[in-house]
């Protein structure tokens, strides 16, 4: 499928956080894009810097829970995570389910309140990742608002149209060359988002995604 892999440099992370700080960002932010964030040994530091730079943002941590321990969740909670979303994708009861539920009982009430545990079955409506995967219940859409509400940046600093762009094919700009604000407000980005909101799907990924 040709996906490049790597860790986002701290320099890029700080660049993004500095720009968001100047915007007084108070939306949601999550260190995730087809990765398992708990594998990154810098995670506590990254979350701490996010919290320090963006005191009004809501920090989400999406994880599959494989490496989750009560200590790790307490540490990340103290560093600044507001919401932990533990997602497991198995047909029946996940093998790891009992462990996650027991881990939640070990957490302090403050941290436990932040954890959302979800089990996604194949009957749930899932994205087909722009046509890359087959799903049982494909959600067909007439219009798309996701590109208007989410800003996705890959590990190289490329700003992408959408989180479904697994291979970073639809690049709106790169934060090494332009500011996030310039990329988000560029004519090209505004036009494509407007078309998606009206139900005009011009690229293959979007057509596959909406079932056209
Ligand atoms: S239609 Fe395009 S922008 Fe919208 S969710 Fe699907 S792939 Fe992403």
Image (spheres, rainbow, N blue to C red):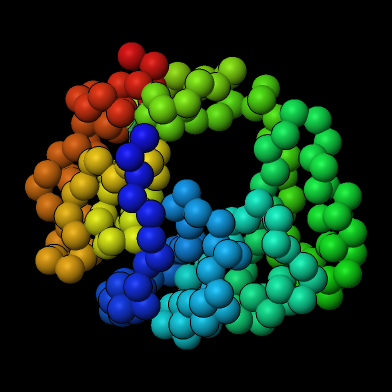
- Image: 176 above or below 1: below
Query: Is residue 7 something one can see in this rendering?
Result: yes
User: Which residue is rendered at x = 29% and y = 45% of the image?
Assistant: 168
User: Which residue is rendered at x = 49% and y = 30% of the image?
Assistant: 127
Left or right: where 145 falls relative to 86: left
Specify the quadrant that holds the N terminus. top left
Specify the quadrant that holds the C terminus. top left
User: Which residue is rendered at x = 75% and y = 28% of the image?
Assistant: 91
Considering depth in this image, is 8 or 47 the residue closer to the camera?
Answer: 8
- Image: 4 above or below 79: above
Residue 113 location, x and y as percent?
77, 65
Query: Is residue 51 something one can see in this rendering?
Result: no
Left or right: where 104 falls relative to 35: right
Residue 6 location, x and y as percent?
38, 60
Please, which residue is most extreme toward the top here?
212
Considering depth in this image, is 194 or 212 the residue closer to the camera?
Answer: 212
- Image: 11 above or below 192: below
């Amino acid at each position: 499928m040709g996906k490049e892999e790597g860790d986002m440099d701290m320099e890029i992370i700080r660049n993004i956080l500095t720009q968001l700080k100047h915007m007084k960002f108070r939306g949601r932010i999550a260190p995730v894009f087809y990765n398992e964030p708990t594998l990154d040994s810098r995670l506590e530091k990254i979350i701490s810097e996010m919290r320090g730079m963006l005191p009004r943002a809501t920090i989400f941590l999406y994880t599959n829970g494989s490496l989750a321990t009560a200590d790790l969740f307490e540490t990340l909670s103290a560093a600044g995570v507001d919401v932990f979303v533990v997602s497991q994708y198995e047909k029946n009861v996940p093998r790891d389910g009992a462990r996650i539920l027991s881990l939640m009982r070990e957490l302090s009430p403050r941290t436990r309140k932040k954890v959302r545990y979800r089990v996604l079955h194949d009957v749930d409506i899932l994205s087909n990742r722009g046509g890359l995967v087959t799903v049982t219940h494909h959600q067909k859409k007439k219009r798309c608002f996701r590109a208007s509400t989410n800003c996705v940046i890959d590990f190289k600093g490329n700003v992408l149209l959408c989180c479904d762009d697994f291979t970073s094919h639809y690049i709106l700009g790169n934060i090494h060359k332009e500011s996030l604000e310039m990329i988000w407000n560029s004519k090209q980005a505004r036009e494509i988002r407007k078309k998606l909101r009206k139900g005009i799907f011009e690229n293959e990924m979007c057509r596959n995604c909406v079932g056209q």
